[in-house]
Image (cartoon, grey):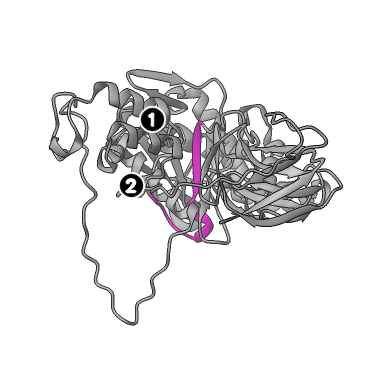
Amino acid sequence: MQRILQSVNMVQFDLIMPKLGESIEEATITKWFVKVGDKIEDDDILLEIATDKVDSEIPSPVSGTVVKIHYEQDQTVPVGTIIAVIDTSEGDVVLDDAPVQEEVVDEQAPVSDTPTPDTVETIEAVPLQEVEKTGGSGRFYSPLVLTIAREEGVSMDELDAIQGSGRNGRVQKKDILDYVKTRTAPAASKPVSSPTATQPASQPAAAEKPKVSVSVSAEDEIIEMDRMRKLIRDHMIMSKQTSAHVTNMLETDVTDIVLWRNKVKDEFVQREGEKITYLPIFMEAIIQALKDFPMINASVDGDKIILKKDINLGIAVALPTGNLIVPVIKRADSLNLLGLTKALNKMANDARNNKLSPDDIQGGTFTISNFGTFRNVMGTPVINQPQVAILAIGTVEKKPAVIETPTGDVIGIRHKMFLSLTYDHRIIDGAYGGAFLRNLADYLESFDGNRVI
């Protein structure tokens, strides 16, 4: 038995999965706030959806009654797909209990596929098949990919071994279809722990998820990872498997920057209504260094290197939940110091207040991780794919240093910090990465302490 909705003179409104960004092709329903039979008003929040790291609440564009919900929580739905149906007529919607197969029609009216104003239309919830959405590696798979895998006899172990072309390495329809075309034997007969004839020895062999024995005592607390934590986990593992990580570090003198900011920060707040931190000043120098070393502002596509025309700076922001997000300042190279400051402050506020759109976290070409926010001296961050480098900025500290003067060397107190550049050794060698880092430090150390903003 299943609850069936009957509505006379029903005016149907199809609610579709919205397109929240240029490159967004699908979204996951994380929560429904309504159920079938609920009456709703215009602008009532119907559901929450997630695309990668951003959650968005979807309001109703119409008033009426929810008569059908096509997809349940945790299902991934392509953009443009109908996800629910709303009856916008003023008539009452009657909720009955009836078998799913039963069809309610006007017996005196001819049977027709097209409802007329005098027809009682029967709408029933679409039964959803329960399918496993994650494999042994914890990767998420869309219902379409799982359906193809089931029809073609592709096991979860095989799915976990497929290199996805989607965002964060997600397996898409074309990936599994290509795999089916080239596969010569079922996964059960393949030694996944070693290279095969179709897998170059230089590539990491697909391996089963290592089974780690973890002992748990009665006093231990077990916490389930939230969705964002799982995404970060998968993205970081994918990055380590994709790029050959190398890190260079150096210490730079930022005394002139510290003194200048201390001199102008109060006037800046009064005039602009914005606080100026060290970061936009560092970003200005980073942009200049990226222009001098364009290979750092690039991506890798197989055997091709893509040099990015724009400089889109991603800034790692810690959220109150303890998670991390990387919003992007698009075309940062077109902004002056004031523009960078305003863009940075807005981006950080939007991130912490969950107001970022999916487009706000896409398109980055180079990422900055400000370890100094937490008084950390240095760090070795993981590359944010598909970028080829990431910069870590350490805390600014007062240190004794040798100062060269016309009359000889003296010991003085200087403000110093460490810079750490992690880069992809597939296309960037130590000489190039080290030269970029030295070039950046030179820009910071030559800062004009008398400049006017």
Q: Position of residue 415 (x, y in %)?
A: 52, 53
- Quadrant housing the N terminus: bottom right
The answer to whether residue 275 shows anywhere in this view is no
Q: Which residues are magenta?
A: 365-379
Marks 1 and 2, the one that precedes in the sequence: 2
**Residue at disc 1, secondary structure:** helix
Q: Residue at x 52, y 47 (%)?
A: 127
Q: Position of residue 196 (x, y in %)?
A: 14, 29
Residue 190 position by quadrant: top left
Residue 287 position by quadrant: top right
Q: Residue at x 70, y 48 (%)?
A: 67
* Near-viewer residue (408 or 349): 349
Q: Which mark is residue 435?
A: 1
Locate residue 424 relative to residue 258 in the image: left or right.
Answer: left
Q: Residue furthest front?
A: 108
**Residue at disc 2, secondary structure:** loop
Q: Residue at x 33, y 23 (%)?
A: 178
* Near-viewer residue (451 or 294): 294
Locate residue 199 relative to residue 240 in the image: left or right.
Answer: left
* Near-viewer residue (274 or 220): 220
The residue that label 2 is drawn on is 135
Q: Residues within 10 Å of mark 1 (few under 14, many from 20)?
A: few
